[in-house]
């Protein structure tokens, strides 16, 4: 699916389909193509919105989880969005959690996949090994169970990012911020239905992290996908979409019934 990026004010975003809003938040090295399978499937019956977070452009003193949450708050206000299902991968999950804690009235459901916020084997600090393409390729491949999921296009994109000093400084600042902002004590305050979809072979946020999220978020359910790393929606899009479909339908029915 060829996603069309819209430009409005200071924001760039994807906005496909109509209906109830699914707001998708990408990770630290997240590309729009990461969400192709989700957008293609769900835009038939939902409005799928993906704001491009200014990870590589934001002011250095704002480069961190709080700065990204503030950006999403501004975007949601600008687009007048409400009653959203927030779906975040990796750093995007972390931002989704903090946003939900701060703006519970705006969020109907929460979906986390490979989320940071408790523990992650951060790639941010190790990526700036400048000019070494094979090293970057290896680290990007480490994200997935099947390294071939890391396409040349994706590796090239990350390689270009790591060769920019300004972008590297922001990546490191954001990665350190994510590690500092541990949400363990706050997760009991998440009240909305929460779905956890995790790669059973995730080496960045291992299965133990998923179990801990499941324990700390009371109204949550956890599903593992086998032979899958840190980005289930990329490695196993059909399985990911199937789990999400059932969760959305079930929680819709439950809400209607109450």
Image (cartoon, rainbow, N blue to C red):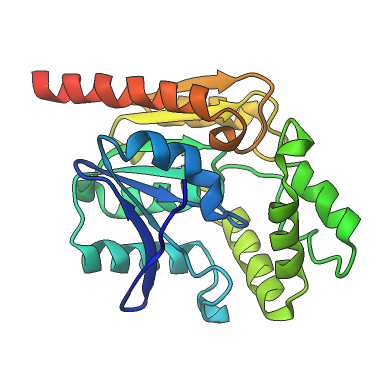
The percent coordinates of residue 69 (x first, y second) are 40, 62
The percent coordinates of residue 124 (x first, y second) are 71, 59
Left/right of residue 205 with respect to residue 163 in the rendered view: left
Query: Farthest residue toward the front?
Result: 2
Left/right of residue 240 with respect to residue 258 in the rendered view: right
The percent coordinates of residue 32 (x first, y second) are 51, 54
Q: Of 9 and 120, which appears nearest the observer?
A: 9
Residue at 69 percent across and 22 percent down: it is 227
Q: Looking at the image, is 96 positioned above or below residue 7?
A: above
Residue at 50 percent across and 32 percent down: it is 213
In which image quadrant can residue 234 be found?
A: top right
Q: Of 232 and 222, which appears nearest the observer?
A: 232
Residue at 63 percent across and 72 percent down: it is 170
**Residue 258 shows up from this direction:** no
Left/right of residue 9 with respect to residue 186 in the rendered view: left
In which image quadrant can residue 85 be found?
A: top left
Residue at 87 percent across and 60 percent down: it is 133
Q: Looking at the image, is 156 positioned above or below residue 167?
A: above
Left/right of residue 151 with respect to residue 51 in the rendered view: right
The percent coordinates of residue 184 (x first, y second) are 50, 41
């Amino acid at each position: 699916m060829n996603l069309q990026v819209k430009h409005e004010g200071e924001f760039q975003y994807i906005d496909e389909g109509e209906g109830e809003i699914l707001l998708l938040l990408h990770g630290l090295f997240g590309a729009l193509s990461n969400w192709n399978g989700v957008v293609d499937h769900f835009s038939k019956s939902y409005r799928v919105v993906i704001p491009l977070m200014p990870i590589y452009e934001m002011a250095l003193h704002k480069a961190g989880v709080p700065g990204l949450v503030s950006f999403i708050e501004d975007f949601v206000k600008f687009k007048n969005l409400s009653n959203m299902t927030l779906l975040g991968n990796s750093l995007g999950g972390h931002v989704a959690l903090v946003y939900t804690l701060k703006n519970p009235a705006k969020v109907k459901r929460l979906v986390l996949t490979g989320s940071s916020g408790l523990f992650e084997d951060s790639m941010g600090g190790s990526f700036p090994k400048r000019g070494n393409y094979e090293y970057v390729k290896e680290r990007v491949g480490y994200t997935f169970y099947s390294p071939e999921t890391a396409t040349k296009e994706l590796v090239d994109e990350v390689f270009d990012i790591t060769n920019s000093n300004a972008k590297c400084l922001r990546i490191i600042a954001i990665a350190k911020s994510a590690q500092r902002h541990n949400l363990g004590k706050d997760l009991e305050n998440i009240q909305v239905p929460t779905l956890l979809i995790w790669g059973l072979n995730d080496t960045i946020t291992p299965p133990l992290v998923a179990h801990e999220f499941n324990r700390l978020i009371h109204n949550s359910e956890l599903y593992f996908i086998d032979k899958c790393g840190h980005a289930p929606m990329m490695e196993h899009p059909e399985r990911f979409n199937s789990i999400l479909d059932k969760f959305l339908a079930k929680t819709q029915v439950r809400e209607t019934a109450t």
